[in-house]
Amino acid sequence: MAAETGTPTTLTLKSNDDELFSVAESAAILSVTIRNMVEDGCAGGVIPLDNVDGKTLASVITYMNGISAIPADEEKKKSYRDKFLSDKDFETLADMVLAANYLNMSCLMDAVSAKIAQVMEKKSVGWVRRKFGIENDYTPEEEAAVKEEHKWTFEGVETDDDN
Amino acid sequence: MRNKGLFFLIINLPPHIIIEILARLPPKKIIQCKSVCKKWLELINEPYFASFHFTLSIPSLVVHQTETFKNFFKIVHFDDKYDHHSLPRDTMLKFNLKNLSIFSDSNIVVDGSVHGFLLVRDVNYKHETLYVCNPLTREYFQLPSPKGLVRYPSVVTHGFGVSLISQEYKVVRIFHERELHPRNRSCVRVPYSETQVYTLGKTGWRTIGGAPFAYDSRSIGLFFEGRLHWLIQDLEAAHDLISSFDLENEEFRPIPPPFRPRRKLLGSLGVLKGCLCLCDNTSNFEIEIWVMKEYGVEESWGREYSIKKIPELSGPSYQIVHALKVFKDGNILISSPIRVIFVHIFSLVKSSPSDFCTYFIIGRVRSE
């Protein structure tokens, strides 16, 4: 394994649209998927990542480099993650959660899932269906029944004075 | 998946990723999401989802607020940082308990909590009823009626927990007939006792025999380490102070106490920093908190904190107080029924103390 020579090792990752990226092995092994390939000695040439496109992979590598440059300080890592995800739109976040899942990066998975949840929080059921590409398979009667059962969750903000 | 359009990718978010996302939503939003589609309803209703959501959830307090014509649970998150703590006034959620009981004269109290579920009881003697409820989703169900009515001077105490191995949720009800001292009305003898267990998901109550200890009537079972714990009244001067009930094998066992009390304690059991603790308010000037660092080991008891009462609270005390949480900044959240008469709080902190009582911060803590 190249890491045993003592010099920093660089890996080459290939996206599913054939873009090539160089990344330090120490940063790339945040991905358990990549780490397993390195440990199995499969990382000699180019590592193909068939489930990630170039745009998303570039973003993930930015994250890998950014987070691995921060020493073990959970508060600082958290604020880096917050900042990193702050300007991402829903579609980008959806791509990233799939990439994080495929690459097996639990810290990115947690952060992106939480960010998507945060974006969803104030949105309507209709918005959720549109963005997640979900077809409403309830009949109007069934949907009305489900909503009626949990009516309170659709009510406005409750104040301390109401009953 | 090569070169697929965004739309195609998104509709293919696999169920386990959907769960990761949904479990990070606030409870109210999760329930709203049941109306997105049938698949999501199914995902959210699975027991796995509830337990996964629980592992991610932040400990919070359930405040039981009772005023004339009002009876609420409020769920309050607290801020716990190394430099400050706070209990926000704004509440996340409010659950009107009027809707729980069909009786307009219901009198709801909290008798236990485990993993975010509450055991609540309508104590109105005409229609005493037990419910298990999830205050976040507002879902609840009524337990079958237990055997034996409670009429003064008889008392009952309850406990609610989950067994360590079989992971069964159980409600324990201990019934005591009491013989009172003719003058001071304290309990001198327990002619008859009965322990009843109800396993959630099974039918009916089981009577498993008597109860080997006289229970302090104000003590509610504290769930910790697969066991329920009660402070007991030592009628035979055997120096027992704490009783425990193993929810797995359904057996009682005394827990060695930190000291032998000379008189009846104004005490409560709780969990602080993952350890069983005894919060003693018997002294006029100090609240003492004893912590059992190694569960079940008598020698590991230590007087961990003593809290000097603020002047207006000094003097003879008649109230049980509860230690709920040690904040990272060194303050301790103590609940007491003295000051804010109508606000009841108990903690939902994981494997937590469960009692209803009032909250306020009574002063800085001196750690010993």
Image (spheres, coloured by chain):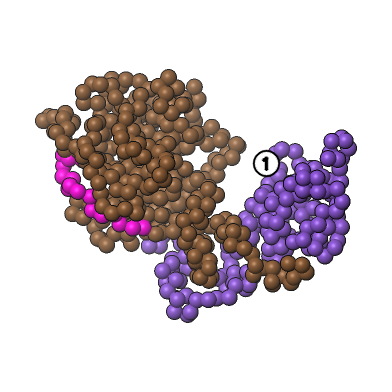
Chain colours: A purple, B brown
Nearer the observer, B344 or B340: B344
Q: How many marks on residues?
A: 1
* Position of residue B236 in the picture relative to residue B368 (left or right): left
**Horizontal side, residue A107 vs residue B87: left or right:** right
Check the residue under mark 1 and report the chain it is in.
Answer: A
Examine the rendering and report whether any part of residue B339 can be seen.
no
Which residue sits at x=31%, y=38%? B250
Q: Is residue B142 magenta?
A: yes
Residue sitting at the far bottom: A140
Kindly tell me whether residue B42 is visible in this rendering: yes
Q: Would residue A159 appear left or right of A57 to someone viewing this image?
A: left
Q: Where is residue B344 in the image (x, y as percent from the top left)?
A: 37, 46
| Mark 1 residue element | helix
- Magenta span contains residue B308: no
**Which x, y percent locates residue B272?**
46, 34
Question: What residue is drawn where x is 42% and y is 71%?
Answer: A148
Residue B338 x, y percent position in the rendering: 35, 38
Residue B261 relative to residue A93: left or right: left
Q: Which residue lies furthest to the left in this view?
A: B182
| Mark 1 residue crowding within 10 angstroms, few (<14) / some (14–19) / many (20+) | few
Residue B117's place in the image compared with B34, above or below, is above
Kindly indicate the quadrant of the structure image that contains residue A53: bottom right
Quadrant where the N terminus of chain B lies? Answer: bottom right
Q: Main secondary structure of the magenta part?
A: loop
Write the start and end of the magenta stretch as one range.
B140-155
Q: What residue type is labelled 1?
A: Glu
Q: Mark 1 points at which residue?
A: A74
Rendering quarter of residue B263: top left
Residue B354, image x, y percentages: 38, 42
Is B364 located above or below residue B144 in the figure? above
The residue at the point 50 percent across, 55 percent down is B48
Q: Which residue is drawn at 86% across and 42% down?
A: A9
